[in-house]
Image: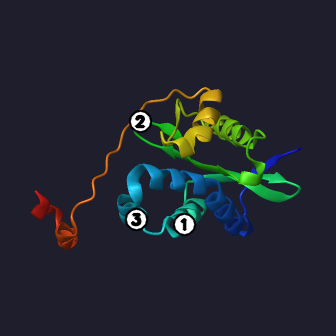
């Protein structure tokens, strides 16, 4: 299986969005199990639409470099990088591989390719974020295999009673 990595073209964006949604569906199923339906639906009321917008936005963002992995002249994965200032660091902002092509080294290839491009740009460190849930386990394996060091972070959620949700439009100064 030969995978070629090339710059994203605008014609690729729809395919990249589609493969990302398929790739990340297990992640959001994992989130639903962990958070429970009530919190999940409040935090991710339409996860697919939100993720589609996020991927398209990253693919079109000024200053973001995006590449696709092609197999038989068809995108099967993508990676997006950005360089941040102060302190200067590179970030692998998004990476996804179509589920039909996972487990074949495509994710590792994309991560290594992105790290090489960021090294060529002179950044001193590269970061990548992911979840600690079961749905992100394959991603964590790819990042660890690529030599990334994990810094565990935790995010907590709490559903508030419906009557407290009437204050959703309160300004932050009112929230104190």
Task: Please say if 172 is above or below 31.
Answer: below
- Do residues under tags 3 and 2 come within 8 Å of each other at their CB atoms? no
The residue shown at (55%, 51%) is: 27
The answer to whether one can see residue 120 in this image is: yes
Q: Residue at x 36, y 64 (%)?
A: 42
Nearer to the camera, 35 or 167: 35
Q: What distance separates the C-alpha of mark 1 from that of mark 2? A: 33 Å
Frontmost residue, 82 versus 161:
161
Q: Nearer the viewer, mark 1 or mark 3?
A: 3
Q: What is the CA distance from the residue labelled 3 to the residue labelled 2?
A: 36 Å
On the rendered structure, is 115 left or right of 29?
Answer: right
Please provide percent x and percent y for residue 107: 70, 42
Task: Specify the quadrant that holds the C terminus.
Answer: bottom left
Marks 1,3: beta carbons within 8 A:
no
Q: Residue at x 52, y 31 (%)?
A: 125
- The location of residue 116, given as percent across then percent down, is 68, 35
For residue 41, which numbered disc appears in the image?
3
Classify residue 175 by image quadrant. bottom left
Q: Are marks 1 and 2 in contact (CB under 8 Å)?
A: no
- Mark 2, other Cα within 10 Å: few <14 / some 14–19 / many ≥20: few
Q: Quadrant of the N terminus?
A: top right
State whether residue 120 is above or below residue 102.
above
Determine which of the numbered discs, if any, sits on residue 87 in the image.
Answer: 2
Residue identified by numbered label 1: 48
Indicate the quadrant where residue 85 lies. Answer: top left
- Of marks 3 and 2, the one in the foreground: 3
């Amino acid at each position: 299986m030969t995978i070629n990595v090339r710059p994203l073209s605008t014609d690729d964006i729809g395919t990249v969005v589609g493969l990302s949604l398929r790739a990340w569906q297990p992640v959001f199923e994992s989130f639903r199990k962990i958070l429970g339906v009530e919190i999940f639906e409040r935090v991710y009321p339409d996860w697919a639409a939100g993720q589609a917008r996020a991927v398209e936005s990253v693919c079109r963002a000024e200053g973001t470099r995006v590449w696709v992995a092609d197999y038989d002249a068809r995108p099967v994965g993508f990676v997006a990088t950005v360089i941040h200032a102060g302190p200067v660091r590179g970030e692998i902002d998004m990476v996804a591989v179509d589920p039909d092509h996972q487990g074949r080294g495509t994710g590792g290839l994309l991560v290594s390719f992105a790290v090489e491009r960021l090294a060529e740009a002179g950044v001193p460190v590269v970061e990548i974020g992911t979840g600690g849930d079961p749905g992100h386990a394959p991603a964590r394996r790819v990042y660890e295999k690529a030599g990334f060091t994990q810094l565990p972070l935790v995010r907590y959620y709490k559903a508030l009673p419906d009557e407290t949700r009437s204050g959703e439009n309160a300004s932050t100064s009112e929230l104190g």
